[in-house]
Amino acid sequence: MKYVDEFRDGKLARNLAEAIAREADTGRDYAFMEFCGGHTHAISRHGVIDLLPPNVRMIHGPGCPVCVLPVGRIDMAIRLALARPEVIVCTYGDCLRVPASGGLSMLGARARGADIRMVYSAADALSLARAEPAREVVFFAIGFETTTPPTALVLREARADGVANFSVICNHVLTPAAITSILESPEARRHGSVPLDGFVGPAHVSTVIGSRPYEFFAEEYRKPVVIAGFEPLDVMQAIRMLVRQVNEGRAEVENEFTRAVVRDGNLKAQARVAEVFEPRRSFEWRGLGEVAYSALKIRTEFARHDAEVRFGLAYAPVPDNKACECGAILRGVKKPLDCKLFATVCTPENPMGSCMVSSEGACAAHYNYGRFRDATPGGVRPPRPALASGPTTVKIEEPVR
Amino acid sequence: MTGVKPGYVRPLDLKRGRIDMGHGAGGRATAQLVSELFAQAFANDFLARGDDGAVLPAPAPGEQLVVATDAHVVSPLFFPGGDIGCLSVHGTINDLAVMGARPLYLSAAFILEEGLALDTLARIVASMAEAARAAGVPVVTGDTKVVEQGKGDGVFITTTGVGALPAGRALGGANARAGDALLLSGSIGDHGMAIMAQRESLAFDAEIVSDTAALHELVEAVLTAVPAVRVLRDPTRGGLATTLNEIATQSAVGMELDETAIPVRPQVAAACELLGLDPLYVANEGKLVVVCPPEDAARALAALRAHPLGRDAAHIGTVTADPHCFVQVRTGFGGRRMVDWLSGEQLPRIC
């Protein structure tokens, strides 16, 4: 496949792997966080880990929109769809499976009569509203800065054309705020207790916001950032650039993804977003908790298309299972295997925490793609102290209420 | 001289007519639908008797009977490369074939939705009859029911097949052993992506065509060349990944695949890339997975490739000893990953 195979070339990968192994200082460890789920996916799917030397470790960050979406937001959409038969809720594919309260998910709610549909784009949702004037079409908008401009465009269009039966539940979140939250975590602030030497910066998000927003992290927190494309060779090249920065004591923003990202980003898209949305004072992230100014809400000028206003929707937070280690895993402090719930009661079929929800989450990625690495010859994964008396000691709480 | 007039029934209006509840009521309309549409299309002596069941000859001495059943629901009903009619014939024939059986007879049950155009039904039945004729497997009995509008999706078809298993043949998912070769008869993902492209109106330079086909001849060719074949499977919904996990679990073995050896057509790969899907999990309707002892791999591969349905056959991996029953793949990039069971439905990723 043209423009894809070139970035997955095994021979080039071997050359890069040799270069990384040559340049990485065997006297130290390197821990880099790939923020984006897209990178996590590329790393898992292509087995990038196998091409890295043992002292270079990747931490899967919180950049998976489905994973960080708090349960209460999905509950909100499900309640609306179940209570009002005139409502059609539509959203992106893998959002449908996210577990919500009461053992439901959007797919589960659909089985109970809610009209919930999958769309490929925000524009499809608006078309549906035009095609079904007697129904209320509610677009459950999720994602980072990549999926925000399309939502802004349909809101503008809906207002301009007076599509009165179209509204949006806005769950759009902001990348820089999440990175700050990770860097401001207690572990990160206590010097040296969290091994985080730099970031592989987002690909698609950066095409919109540019590379400038990351300059703050590089400067303020002394963390190198290398923006990288979503193909595995991009990731390898970015890791090599990060290793070099660390070796040379630099903390800069570098751009590996020059074929798509410029320093200022897409100004037109940014202007459209600013016209339609404003920051929320605070927003809950699954795994990170409340994060100040980390999400967007619809401006009052567009209030008639804001489903939260239009239907008077109230948000009720739902706590995760107490034993869930997602927060610590997202901050790079723990690994999936350190969690008592991992692969025992928490599996992709029955996720208890955010990291297990989508294959881009750290736990699901490890479960789906990497579990074979835990196998010891002739046995299951090594027993961990927490489970010494058997898995029955794990208190199983309902994931959500 | 008699004044009794012959009963006259106006022929079915196959051009403009629609299925109504009467066609499922069991009266004249049902009888007419059966005689003018189904019996004519499937034409054989068993059906012609018009009895409640078909009386079939006993299998040859030493042979055993194999029965398989398959329900078909597909939207859209017609797609590039096929339709629900031929699909319902191929699906059941393939289930018999991968058991090592020679498919002999089919039954067909139709659930029709009120309002279905008779012309649509006639096209589906014609395609079914053609598939059955081409495979040499007659539809010998059937049933038709009609459900109210909105309670069906046009037409659902369930077919059941009977086949004869020659003496000495024992294929089964539990027979794979460490060291065995894994062969695949051709490219994966064609059927699923043909359906998906149609549903989502995706247009590509090269059309994606379903691979729906009856595999019994291909199976015979492989089993004749290599009687020691241990497992045969047709990887349908859930894709190749699901089929391999099933075999691994049943046989308590692991598997190691070579990603670059698995054939995927460029347009299928592109469509998957676009929608964020993995071709390993996309449905096929005319592909065969063969597990055989390593020393027979070359012969089995040659037998597959000699048949038109196996032209692109490939040696895609090896069965390994693994108590965890993990299916692993060596990626073209040079790494490894697990190919796990599909959890839930495969849904497009957001990023």
Image: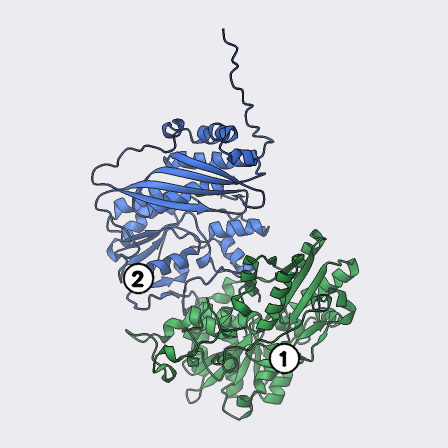
Chain colours: A green, B blue
Residue A230 lies, in percent from the top left, at 54, 69
Local crowd size for mark 1, using a 10 Å CA cut-off: few (<14), some (14–19), many (≥20): some
In the image, B13 versus A186, the foreground residue is B13
Q: Identify the image quadrant of residue A24.
A: bottom left
Please give the count of numbered marks on the rendered protein: 2
Residue A165 lies, in percent from the top left, at 73, 58
Amino acid type, mark 1: Pro
- Residue designated by label 2: B319
Residue A140 lies, in percent from the top left, at 64, 65
**Viewer can see residue A69:** no
Residue B236 lies, in percent from the top left, at 42, 52
Q: Identify the image quadrant of residue A206.
A: bottom right
In the image, B220 versus A245, the foreground residue is B220
> Could you tell whether A278 is left or right of B221 in the image?
right
Q: CA distance from mark 2 to mark 1?
A: 46 Å
Q: Identify the image quadrant of residue A170.
A: bottom right
Question: From what the image shows, is residue B201 above or below residue B10?
Answer: below
User: Which label was assigned to residue A176?
Assistant: 1
The single residue placed furthest to the top in the displayed view is B1
**Viewer can see residue A215:** yes
